[in-house]
Image (cartoon, rainbow, N blue to C red):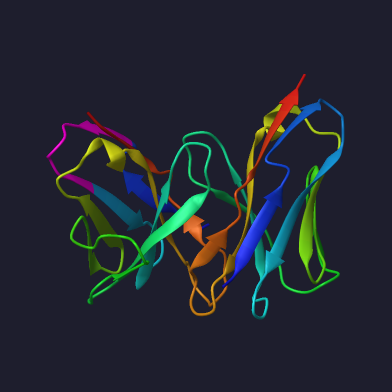
């Protein structure tokens, strides 16, 4: 079945530094990928849509300069949290649609970011 | 705006004690309803897609049903390994973006 791989699974960084998270579709091509954020005991909130070969589209309230998204190929999207602060600590999850419209999204295993 | 509400927020069950989780939705034209299971520290794992009222899907001890306003996830004779957070979601108007409910945290005690 379709597999989405996310790396790293966890990262700890100091306040003010930047962190890059990778999301790869392993056995299918994805022209779009989605980035979600999940705070403890809360549900997933969509942050942005990553579009291969073009700019990402961000949900309302998400700072595009803070969360840089690059979708350089049909199998890789990256999310860079710039100048991270403790309030950016969260669980970041990517997902990709493996095929036809309305086919279920497949999710990566998430990245736990802790900013100290 | 699409809204998805899940209840209860948390559910504690004894092993073998069947129960149901609710997912109520308000959407402008249903394009499917998805159920996912999420284990702690993991991404959501796809369970079911339902498209029309009256539809039912089953997988092991889980059965999902759909009406015009809500979906139920029935857990029959649960085992401790069924402990997880169960999420329902609906696609937004365009594309594959999902709106998730708040989830139901299920704990099954042996």
Q: Is residue B11 left or right of residue A89?
A: right
Residue at point 46%, 55% (across, down): A45
Residue B95 placement (x, y as % from top left): 48, 77
Write down the quadrant of residue A78 in the picture: bottom left
Residue A53 placement (x, y as % from top left): 22, 76
Residue A11 placement (x, y as % from top left): 26, 34
Q: Is residue B41 left or right of residue B86?
A: left
Write down the quadrant of residue A58 in the picture: bottom left
Query: Which residue is outermost to the top?
Result: B110
Q: Is residue A28 left or right of residue B33?
A: left
**Residue B98 visible from this viewpoint:** yes
Write down the quadrant of residue A18 in the picture: top left
A22 is higher (above) or lower (below) than B108: below
Closer to us: A97 or A40: A40
Residue at point 27%, 73% (across, down): A52
A108 is higher (above) or lower (below) than A10: below
Query: Is A12 within the magenta?
Result: yes
Residue A33 placement (x, y as % from top left): 37, 65
Closer to us: A46 or A86: A86
Image quarter where the C terminus of chain B lies is: top right
Image quarter where the N terminus of chain B lies is: bottom right
**Residue A30 visible from this viewpoint:** no
Closer to us: B86 or A60: A60
In the rendered structure, which segment of residues is drawn in magenta?
A10-20
Q: Is residue B75 left or right of residue A16?
A: right
B94 is higher (above) or lower (below) than B64: below
Residue at point 48%, 45% (across, down): B43
Closer to us: B21 or B32: B21
Query: Is A1 within the magenta?
Result: no
């Amino acid at each position: 079945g379709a597999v989405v791989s996310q790396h790293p699974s966890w990262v700890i960084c100091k306040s003010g530094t930047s962190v890059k998270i990778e999301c790869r579709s392993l056995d299918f091509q994805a022209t779009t990928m989605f980035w979600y954020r999940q705070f403890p005991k809360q549900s997933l909130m969509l942050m942005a849509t990553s579009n291969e070969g073009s700019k990402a589209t961000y949900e309302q309230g998400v700072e595009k300069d803070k969360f840089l998204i690059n979708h350089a190929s049909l199998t890789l999207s990256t999310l860079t949290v710039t100048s991270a602060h403790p309030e950016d600590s969260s669980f970041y999850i990517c997902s990709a649609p493996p095929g036809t419209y309305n086919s279920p999204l497949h999710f990566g295993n998430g990245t736990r970011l802790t900013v100290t | 705006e699409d809204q998805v509400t899940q209840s209860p927020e948390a559910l504690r069950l004894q092993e073998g004690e069947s129960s149901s989780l609710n997912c109520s939705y308000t959407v402008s034209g249903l394009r499917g309803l998805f159920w996912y299971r999420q284990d702690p520290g993991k991404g959501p794992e796809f369970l079911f897609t339902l498209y029309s009222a009256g539809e039912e899907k089953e997988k092991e001890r889980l059965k999902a049903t759909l009406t015009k306003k809500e979906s139920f996830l029935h857990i029959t004779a649960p085992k401790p390994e069924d402990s997880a957070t169960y999420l329902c979601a609906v696609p937004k108007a365009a594309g594959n973006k999902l709106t998730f409910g708040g989830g139901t945290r299920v704990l099954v005690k042996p």
